[in-house]
Image (tube, rainbow, N blue to C red):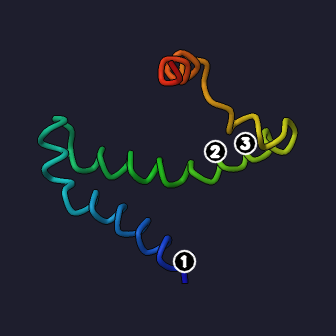
């Protein structure tokens, strides 16, 4: 059930962007064709990125991407005091 809900929310997020294409094209001063191409290219490249980062996580371990970035240290230190 949770997987179906997650899929539905992801699809809803994508279709929200599609519904406001004309406004986005006006705001960014690009044609609807260019905007549609960029959206399609983004969706096509998602599996490629998932494959590359999945292979990297398999080689280096899955905990490395979950480590906090270096900038988080001072924030945590400031909260403790």
- The residue under the point 12% across, 42% down is 26
Seen from the viewer's position, the closer of residues 4 and 2 is: 2
Seen from the viewer's position, the closer of residues 28 and 14 is: 14
Crowding at label 2, few (<14), some or many (≥20) Cα neighbours within 10 Å?
Answer: few
Relative image position of residue 69 (x, y in whole percent): 60, 25
As drawn, 7 above or below 18:
below
Asked if labels 2 and 3 touch by Cβ distance under 8 angstroms, the answer is yes
Q: Which circle marks residue 49 in the picture? A: 2
- The residue under the point 53% across, 23% down is 80
Left or right, 63 with reference to 29: right
Report how far apart the C-alphas of labels 3 and 2 lie in the structure.
5 Å
Relative image position of residue 67 (x, y in whole percent): 68, 33
As drawn, 35 above or below 70:
below
Relative image position of residue 10 (x, y in whole percent): 44, 65
Which of pointers 2 and 1 lies earlier in the amino acid sequence? 1
| Quadrant in which residue 13 is drawn | bottom left
Quarter holding the N terminus is bottom right
Q: Residue at label 1?
A: 2
Left or right, 18 with reference to 60: left
Crowding at label 3, few (<14), some or many (≥20) Cα neighbours within 10 Å?
Answer: few
Label 2 residue SS: helix
Asked if labels 1 and 2 touch by Cβ distance under 8 angstroms, the answer is no
Which of pointers 1 and 3 lies earlier in the amino acid sequence? 1
Residue that extends furthest to the right in the rendered view of this protein: 59
Label 1 residue SS: helix
- The residue under the point 58% across, 19% down is 73
Seen from the viewer's position, the closer of residues 25 and 65 is: 65
Label 3 residue SS: helix
Q: Residue at label 3?
A: 52
């Amino acid at each position: 059930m949770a997987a179906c809900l997650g899929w539905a929310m992801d699809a809803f997020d994508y279709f929200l962007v599609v519904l406001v294409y004309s406004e986005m094209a006006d705001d960014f001063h690009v044609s609807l064709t260019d905007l549609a191409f960029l959206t399609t290219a983004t969706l096509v490249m998602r599996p490629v990125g998932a494959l590359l980062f999945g292979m990297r996580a398999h080689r280096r371990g899955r905990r490395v991407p979950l480590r906090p970035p270096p900038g988080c240290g001072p924030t945590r230190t400031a909260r403790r005091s």
